[in-house]
Image (cartoon, helix red, strand yellow):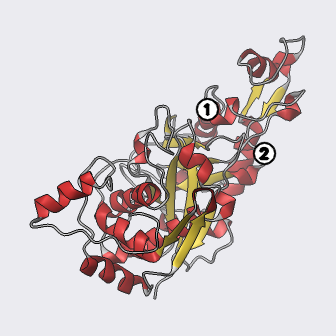
């Protein structure tokens, strides 16, 4: 799929040969793909009411122009159904928004993946998983929408492992990283509404993310949140060790973070999302002594540094809180952002239907 604006036509004799040709052309993520036939790509475009030549976004740093046709071809290869395509398009538009700074997380040594969070009526319409086995396998919509994003990064944005994707270790979310919020099962405001959309709209939020860190805690809100804050404050994540360093604690620059909370929504009946964010924001922090020992902040540890703390999240609003996961236990997850030293900001786009 060279970035010439023209269609690459490949012919094959049978389906198995087609799959192998996709490997030869470098179009896969290491797993077999569905051949992107002209008929199938046209079906996807029709489902979204888009023309193949319509621009979805650009990546100027790599001289890439991404069209709806390219997005459709990669969605086909990922195994999506045509009705999944508007969600994939919204995710592509979001990650190509200049605010997201796609060139950073897609090429960094840190190995971030693009987490896709889906909200609104489309979650129920497409049966996108928001409950048990949230980040795991078993759901076609989650697996293929997330995989389509990765194939778009590779084939349309040149984020090819070993070329522009310079990840040192990466993580499994770089194959597929897509979830939905269980917004119909909680009194909490949905994520897309927090970010300015109406409840009846469908929307996709993209977030440059490390892998999810599971948090297990007893069934009391404060105990759960205290444990989440402790996990979110650990050294070794981009939150605590990749900030830009100044002359003092104030010189540490941080980023956003995603927190998912599962279990019984009734447990949180006395807590709003704002309550949760404020509680976490006050406790996601490290001492100046810890940050100096880890060489995040300069200078030797001084008297009083153990009692001085640095917040690792700028504002409560920078905690993207999502109610999602199974009902059987009070399991949560913490998902640190990619490289706050350079920065990538979560972006939300509407899922537009024809």
Q: Position of residue 219 (x, y in %)?
A: 52, 39
- Of residue 164 and residue 87, the one placed in the foreground of this image is 164
Q: Is residue 272 visible?
A: no
At 49% from the left and 68% from the top, the residue drawn is 184
Mark 2 nearby-residue class (10 Å; few <14, some 14–19, many ≥20): some
Q: Residue tagged by mark 2?
A: 314
Quadrant where the N terminus sits is bottom left
Mark 1: which secondary structure? Answer: loop
Mark 1 nearby-residue class (10 Å; few <14, some 14–19, many ≥20): some
Question: Based on the displayed image, in which of its 4 quarters is residue 142 positioned?
Answer: bottom left
Judged left or right of residue 159, residue 248 is right
Which label belongs to residue 237? 1
At 67% from the left and 55% from the top, the residue drawn is 345
Q: Which residue appears farthest toward the left when viewing the image?
A: 14
Q: Position of residue 340 (x, y in %)?
A: 70, 42
Mark 2: which secondary structure? Answer: loop
Judged left or right of residue 297, residue 348 is left
Disc 1 versus disc 2: nearer the observer: 1
- Pointer 1 or 2: first along the chain: 1
Q: Position of residue 280 (x, y in %)?
A: 70, 42
Question: Based on the displayed image, in which of its 4 quarters is residue 162 positioned?
Answer: top left
Looking at the image, is 224 positioned above or below residue 293?
below
């Amino acid at each position: 799929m060279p970035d010439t604006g023209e269609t690459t036509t490949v012919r094959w004799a049978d389906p198995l040969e087609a799959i192998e040709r996709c490997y030869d052309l470098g179009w896969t993520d290491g797993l077999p793909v569905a051949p992107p036939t002209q008929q199938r790509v046209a079906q996807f475009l029709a489902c979204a009411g888009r023309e193949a030549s319509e621009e979805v976004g650009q990546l100027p740093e790599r001289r890439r122009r991404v069209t709806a046709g390219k997005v459709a071809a990669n969605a086909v290869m990922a195994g999506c159904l045509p009705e999944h395509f508007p969600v994939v398009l919204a995710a592509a538009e979001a990650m190509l928004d200049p605010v997201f700074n796609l060139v950073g997380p897609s090429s960094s040594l840190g190995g971030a993946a693009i987490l896709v969070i889906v909200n609104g009526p489309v979650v129920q319409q497409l049966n996108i998983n928001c409950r048990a086995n949230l980040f795991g396998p078993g759901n076609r919509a989650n697996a293929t929408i997330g995989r389509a994003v990765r194939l778009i990064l590779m084939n349309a944005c040149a984020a090819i492992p070993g070329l522009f994707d310079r990840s040192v270790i990466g993580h499994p979310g770089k194959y597929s990283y897509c979830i939905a919020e269980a917004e119909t099962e909680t009194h909490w405001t949905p994520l897309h509404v927090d970010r300015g959309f109406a409840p009846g709209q469908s929307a996709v939020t993209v977030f440059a993310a490390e892998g999810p860190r599971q948090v297990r805690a007893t069934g009391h809100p404060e105990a759960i949140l205290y444990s989440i804050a402790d996990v979110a404050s650990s050294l070794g994540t981009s939150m605590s060790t990749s900030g830009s360093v100044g002359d003092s604690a104030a010189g540490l620059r941080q980023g956003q973070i995603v927190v998912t909370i599962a279990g019984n929504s009734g447990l949180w009946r006395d807590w709003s999302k704002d309550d949760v964010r404020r509680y976490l924001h006050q406790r996601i922090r490290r001492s100046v002594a810890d940050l100096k020992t880890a060489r995040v902040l300069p200078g030797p540890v001084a008297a009083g540094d153990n009692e001085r703390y640095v917040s690792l999240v700028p504002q409560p609003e920078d905690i993207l809180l999502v109610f999602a996961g199974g009902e059987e236990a009070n399991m949560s997850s913490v998902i640190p952002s990619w490289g706050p030293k350079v920065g990538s900001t979560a972006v939300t786009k509407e899922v537009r239907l024809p």
